[in-house]
Amino acid sequence: MKVEYCQILIAELKVNIYDGPKCDQHRKYWNMYAEGDKQDDDYEGDLTMTMEEFPPGTKIVVTTPQCPECFMIQTECKCGFNWKEWIEGKYS
């Protein structure tokens, strides 16, 4: 018997690019939405998921931005792609 999966939670690591006294610093935060919520929520800090919260068969998938030039993830990209410019363009 085939069992389908339902997405019940999504979280994106976003950045406030106007943080700090001079509005020139970056501050990361999680933006989360759970099925059944009326709106998304922002959360600063580490995400914690316990096994007791989910049934067996639950999957966690983590995706991260990939460089459009060398196709490596940001932490491994060495080609000189301007990640700061990309981040500021996406989250401004």
Image (spheres, helix red, strand yellow):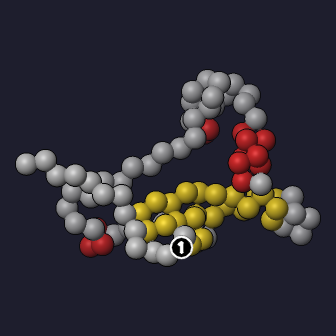
The residue sitting at 55% across, 57% down in the picture is 12
The percent coordinates of residue 5 (x first, y second) are: 26, 54
The residue sitting at 65% across, 24% down in the picture is 69
Q: Quadrant of residue 41?
A: bottom right
According to the image, label 1 marks what residue?
A: 39
Give the crowd class for mark 1: few <14, some 14-19, many >=20 residues within 10 Å.
few
Q: Which one is in front, 61 or 46?
A: 61
The percent coordinates of residue 65 (x first, y second) are: 58, 41
The percent coordinates of residue 6 (x first, y second) are: 30, 57
The percent coordinates of residue 53 (x first, y second) are: 30, 72
In the picture, measured across the screen, residue 3 lies left or right of residue 77, that is: left
Q: Quadrant of residue 26?
A: bottom right
Secondary structure at badge 1 equals loop
In the picture, measured across the screen, residue 81 lies left or right of residue 39, that is: right
Q: Which one is in front, 74 or 31?
A: 31
The residue sitting at 46% across, 60% down in the picture is 10
Identity, as a three-letter code, of the amino acid under mark 1: Gln
In the picture, measured across the screen, residue 79 lies left or right of residue 55, that is: right
Outermost residue toward the front?
Answer: 38
Residue 34 in view (yes/no): yes
Pick the quarter of the image with the C terminus.
bottom right
In the picture, measured across the screen, residue 83 lies left or right of residue 1, that is: right
Residue 84 in view (yes/no): no
Establish if 73 lies above or below 41.
Answer: above
